[in-house]
Image (spheres, rainbow, N blue to C red):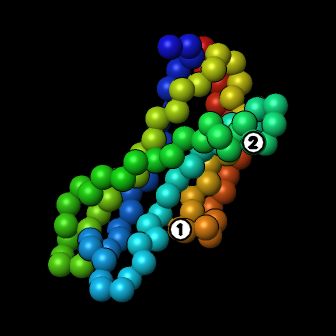
């Protein structure tokens, strides 16, 4: 594989299981490449974090690990991390990562 691998991780306390008639809108992490030629390429190649329950804290609460690995191209990678719940953006941060 060319370049290095970016690893992002976040810990999140959330409902361990949904209540009846509750819609599941868990936190999601996306990483977009701002170096892409077009905006559609950037969104098409977005990395999405996977969710793993680390342990249950109580009957209705659990600790989750949201993590993703994104391959990086050699040189400067212009990225944007977006944290969303449903379609609502909770946090967005642009950053640059240099890979060998």
Residue visible at 75% across and 42% down in the picture? 40
**32 vs 40, nearest the viewer:** 40
Q: Say above or below: 46 vs 72.
A: below
User: Residue pushed farthest right?
Assistant: 37
**Marks 1 and 2: which is nearer the front?**
2
Residue on which disc 1 sits: 85
Location of residue 87 with respect to 32 vertically, above or below: below
- Horizontal and vertical percent position of residue 52: 30, 52
Tell me residue 11's x, y (percent): 38, 57
Cα separation between marks 1 and 2: 21 Å
Residue 43 occupies which quadrant of the picture?
Answer: top right
Q: Secondary structure at mark 2?
A: helix
52 vs 7, nearest the viewer: 52
Please name whichever residue, 4 or 24, is drawn nearer the observer in this view of the structure: 24
Q: Is residue 88 left or right of residue 38?
A: left
Pointer 1 local density, CA inside 10 Å: few below 14, some 14–19, many at least 20: some
Which mark is on residue 40? 2
- Which quarter of the rendering shows the C terminus? top right
Horizontally, residue 59 falls left or right of residue 41, namely left
Q: Position of residue 67 (x, y in %)?
A: 42, 45
Name the residue: 26% across, 57% down.
Answer: 53
Would residue 22 be found to the left or right of residue 94 on screen?
left
Does label 1 or label 2 sit earlier along the sequence?
2
Dividing the picture into quadrants, the one containing residue 64 is bottom left
With respect to residue 14, does 74 lie above or below? above
Q: Give whichever of 32, 55 is nearer the camera.
A: 32
The residue under the point 19% across, 67% down is 56
Give residue 77's mark: none
> From where the camera sits, is residue 9 visible?
no
How many dots with numbers?
2
Across and down, in percent, residue 30 comes to: 57, 49
């Amino acid at each position: 594989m060319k370049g290095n691998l970016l690893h992002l991780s976040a810990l999140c306390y959330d409902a361990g299981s949904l209540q009846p008639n509750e819609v599941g809108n868990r936190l999601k992490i996306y990483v977009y490449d701002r170096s892409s030629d077009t905006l559609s390429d950037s969104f098409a190649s977005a990395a999405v974090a996977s969710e793993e329950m680390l342990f249950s804290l109580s009957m209705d609460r659990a600790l989750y690990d949201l993590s993703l690995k994104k391959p990086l191209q050699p040189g400067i990678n212009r990225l944007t991390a977006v944290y969303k719940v449903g379609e609502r953006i909770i946090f967005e941060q642009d950053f640059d990562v240099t890979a060998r």
